[in-house]
Structure formats: C-alpha cells, structure tokens
Amino acid sequence: MTTCKTQERFTVRIILFLLVLLCIVTGGCGGKASDQEETAEEDSRIKVGFSQLGAESDWRSANTASMKETFTPANGYELIFEDGQQKQANQIKAIRTFIQREVEYIVLAPVTETGWDTVLQEAKDARIPVIIMDRKVDVQDDSLFTCRVGSDFELEGRKAAEWLRSYTEAKGIGPEDLHIVNIQGTIGASAQIGRTKGLADAAKQNGWDLLAEVTGDFTQAKGREVMASLLRQYENINVVYCENDNEALGAIEAIEAAGKTPGLDLTAGEIMIISFDGVNEAALDCVRQGKIACIAQCNPEQGALVSDIIHTLEQGGTPEKISYTEEEIFAVDDTVKEIEIMGTVYPVTILD
Ligand code: GZL
Ligand code: ZN
C-alpha cells in the first residue's frame, strides 16, 4: 500500500467524520440524515479480510476469538472472516475473494509454510498489505508480506526440552534412560517445524533416545490414536512430547486406557508428558494434577497486536517485520524454577 493511497483514505475518513459531526451538531438529522450518518460511519470503517486456517484446537478457537473481539465496528473495523478448514486451497480462495472485495488489509494465519508466493503476489499487485499472524510463510520474496506477529516456535521447543533436561538431571535420571516419542503437530506448520527441531536438537545434544516422531495433527482424537499405536510398538516409552495440549489430552486417554500412569515419577514407571499452548483449562488442570509435567505456553491473544500494526500502517508508519508474543512455562513441581536458553533466563510459573 503506497502512502498516497493511505493519505487519500485518511482524507476521505476526515470528510466523513466531519459530515457525521455536522449532522450531530446541527441536530437537523431527520430520518434521511441519520441514514446518511449510518452509511458514513460504515464507510469510515477499515475493511479487513482474515483468513484463519481452521478450528482444530482450543488454541485456534482462542486465536479466532481474539481477532473477532478486536476487529469490531465499535473499534472502527469491518471484518470479513473465512475459515480455511485446514486446507491451503481454501485460504488461497479466501485471499482472492478479499482482493475482489477490495479489503484494505489482509490477515493470514497460514496452515503450512510453503505455497503462498503466487497469491501473495496478487495481493501485492492489488496494493493490499498482508499481515501474517501465528505461523510463518516461507516465500521467495519477503516483501510479499508487510510483517508477521506470532511465536518463536523453535524457542518454545528449546524451552520444553531444557525443562525436561533440568528436571531429569535434578532427579538423577541419566539421559540414556529417557525414551521419548514426539506426537507432532500438522506437518509443515511452523509450530510443528520449530517444536520438532527444539526436541530433536536437544535429544542429539543430551544423548536421549528419541524413539519416534509421528503427527497427531494438533487434535485430541489423532493424539489418542497415535499414542495407542506407539504404546503397542514400544514397551519402554517414558516421555511423551506433544506439540499441543489437545494431543496431550488424547495421549493421556490412551496411556490410561493401556493401564499406565501419566506422571512425573519416571523411576516408578510413570510416563512424563510435555506439551504446548496452555490455553484450555483441562490441560492446565492436568498440570496441576501432575498428569502433564510441563507446558510451554503459546499465546493466542494476537488480535490487539495485529490491530496495533494496522493503526501504525494507517498513520504511514512502518511496523517491525517480525513481532513475537510473550510466552511462559507452566509446571506444578517446583524442582525447576527457571531455565536458561542462549544466555536468557526464563522463569517457570508454578501453577497452584
Ligand atoms: C501455534 C499454533 C498451533 C497451536 C496448536 O502458534 O499455530 O496451532 O500450538 C494450533 O494448538 O493448532
Ligand atoms: Zn507460541
């Protein structure tokens, strides 16, 4: 979006605002005038097209809610929302619809990283800024999107793995005694790529036995199915790394159905679960009960951050190319009070 288009729109907005003000001040707004007022107010809203990837998890629902609570008429927006139902083709179609409907901004929460270059070029040709939210896009030319707000997924993985290393070391459990399975997220999603790398690198570094990596597609049903299958394949699993809480809840169901116990006491044969998100209360309660040992938080509340970016652009400013959400680590056992990653110390929030 060139600034001249932004200025042009800004001028239109001022005129509309003055028109509305005039109507109100003169009080002479009869039925017809108040219709004009209404139309003027509607026209002054910023039109935003939001392509959400789906509704696969509690995290996703919270993320959608955060956007819908922010992008309201009262906040000066007209939101066009499209649910991609986990399919990139649907999201590409949505973006093309947004272009035809001449939105002023496009927000994209991409289901996977690749395959966006063509449609983002079409948005660029239509001079519509694209804000990437949550997961990343992997494009040839980074000017195809204005900026991204989301998480550092590899850092999330490192935090979870470092918590596991600190905890087991404090309990005197040798690295060679950890037999880990990773129930991954949707393959190709940034959250899966980063969290998988965080664990795989730590397993290599620490000499952990990483038995298997299998996708659970970020859902509870798939998490349960994959866990049951892994328990049939491996009799020595004692750590389950779930790339989101919905998978973890499914894994717990499968572990208990197999007559085993999710917990923290590996020496007593319990199976330790590590997870991500920290959005739904059921998972946080599992932490309090010791069924999930640690959750690396993933913050879905990104609506306000996206709105701030749009306000910056509206005023002709340049937002940061990448902005990350603040995220914590949740546990119930206070053996590990903080962890250090590349010189930065992250406190552990002990849930009561
Ligand atoms: C992470 C987000 C992931 C969540 C999952 O930012 O993309 O997708 O961790 C969700 O719960 O399905
Ligand atoms: Zn996150």
Image (tube, rainbow, N blue to C red):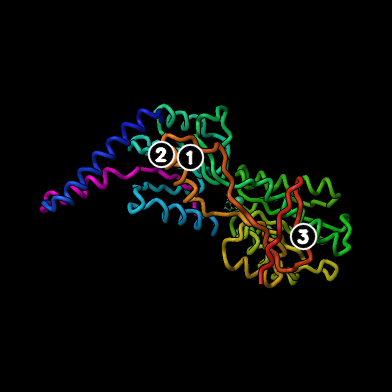
Range of the magenta residues? Answer: 29-56
How would you rate the neighbour count of disc 2 (Cα within 10 Å): few for under 14, some for 14-19, many for 20 or more?
many
Between the C-alphas of marks 3 and 1, the distance is: 37 Å
Residue 314, by quadrant, is top left
Give the label, 3 or 1, closer to the camera: 1
Give the label, 2 or 3, closer to the camera: 2
Residues tagged 1 and 2 counted as in contact (Cβ below 8 A): yes
Tell me what residue is drawn at x 11 percent, y 49 percent.
32
> Residue 239's mark?
3
Decide if ligand 1 comes within 8 Å of the CB at mark 2. Answer: no
Percent x, y of residue 269: 82, 68
How would you rate the neighbour count of disc 3 (Cα within 10 Å): few for under 14, some for 14-19, many for 20 or more?
many
Residue 35 is inside the magenta segment: yes
Residue 309 is inside the magenta segment: no
Decide which of 327, 168 is in the foreground and name it: 327
In this image, 20 relative to 166: left or right? Answer: left
Percent x, y of residue 297: 63, 57
Circle 2 residue: 105
Which quarter of the rendered picture does the N terminus lie within?
Answer: top left
> Residue lying furthest front in this view?
25
Between the C-alphas of marks 2 and 3, the distance is: 44 Å
Decide which of 126, 230 is in the foreground and name it: 126
Between the C-alphas of marks 1 and 2, the distance is: 8 Å
> Residue 164's mark?
none
Circle 1 residue: 131
Tell me what residue is drawn at x 71 percent, y 58 percent.
347
How would you rate the neighbour count of disc 1 (Cα within 10 Å): few for under 14, some for 14-19, many for 20 or more?
many
- The kind of secondary structure element at disc 1 is strand
